[in-house]
Structures are given as structure tokens and as C-alpha cells.
Amino acid sequence: MKETDESVKFWEQKTIEAGKEILFKSFSRFIGTRNEGMKNLTGLLYATEDNIYFEDFEKSSMFDFLMKKKRDYEKFMMDFPLSEITEMRRVSESSAETCINGSIKEAKPQGKIMGFFNPPIWEIKLQSENSLFFELFEPDGLVKLVGK
């Protein structure tokens, strides 16, 4: 991500809030949690040496600007310990959505051919046997940090 004065201040504040250096950051889309329904939130996923954080940001459109209409927005934030992750793998978006909706228990890995046409969705499996699904725009750093 390109750093501006505003983004440098933002990340300095996040480092203070986390109490540790931020080792990974990426734009991300949180699709949802297994059996808990779709979220489909765009935001930031970032990590310290021992925790992963996601927070969304308010979307606005040109229509909102022209109509000067303020929509109800409730900030969504989550975090979980890195030590809770048992596996991180690429899955297809359609199987992730089916898993999120509770129709299947396990998301299917993304096929090699479909990987050329569709961005992978990353399934993060936790010790609680729950799974979180994210589209990551810069996944390499997180994959390396998680190491699973």
C-alpha cells in the first residue's frame, strides 16, 4: 500500500492501539463466518506478531453525495489470536459462500484453472472449528506470518 501522511498517521494510531508493531496489512473483503451468514464487508486486515485484526470502513456512493443522504452505518471490527489458527488455505468463492450459509461443512479448494479467472478466497480455520473467509489483495505476507 502506498503511504501518505494520512495513512502514516492512521497506522501509527493502529500500532498504539494494538500495542505492538504491525507486521502485515492489506485491503481485504471479509465474506463471512462458517454457518453465520454472509457479511461481505470491505476493509483492512492487519496483523501483529500475535493477533489478526479486521475492520471495515463506511462505503459511500455518488448517489449518497448528490442526495446528501446519510445511511446508517455501524462499524464492524474483529480480532483473533494468531495462535488460534490451525490452517489457512485458498478456496473457491462459491464454496466459501455455500459454507458460510451452512449448506456444506467444508469449503472446497480453488481449482488451478479457476484460479486464473477468479481471485482466491482465503479460509482461516480456527481451533474453535470455525472458519473465516477473506479475499486478500496482498496475501503473501499473511501466509508467511501464519505459516500454516
Image (cartoon, helix red, strand yellow):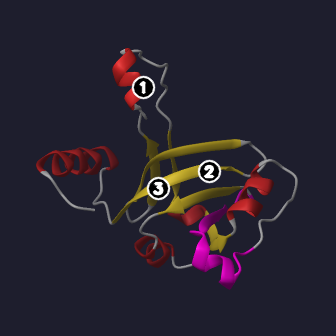
The kind of residue on which mark 2 rests is: Ile
List the single residue furthest toward the right: 103
The kind of residue on which mark 1 rests is: Phe
Q: Can you give x and y, in whole percent of width and height, for residue 80 in the image?
A: 53, 53
Assign a secondary structure to mark 1: helix
List the single residue furthest toward the bottom: 112
Q: Nearer the viewer, mark 2 or mark 1?
A: 1
Q: Nearer the viewer, mark 3 or mark 1?
A: 1
Residue at 71% x, 80% y is 111
Assign a secondary structure to mark 3: strand
Q: Which image quarter: residue 93?
A: bottom right
Over which residues does the magenta segment extend? 109-129
- Horizontally, residue 71 falls left or right of residue 104, namely left
Crowding at dot 3, Cα within 10 Å, few <14 / some 14-19 / many 20+, comes out as: many
Q: Which mark is residue 28?
A: 3
Crowding at dot 1, Cα within 10 Å, few <14 / some 14-19 / many 20+, comes out as: few
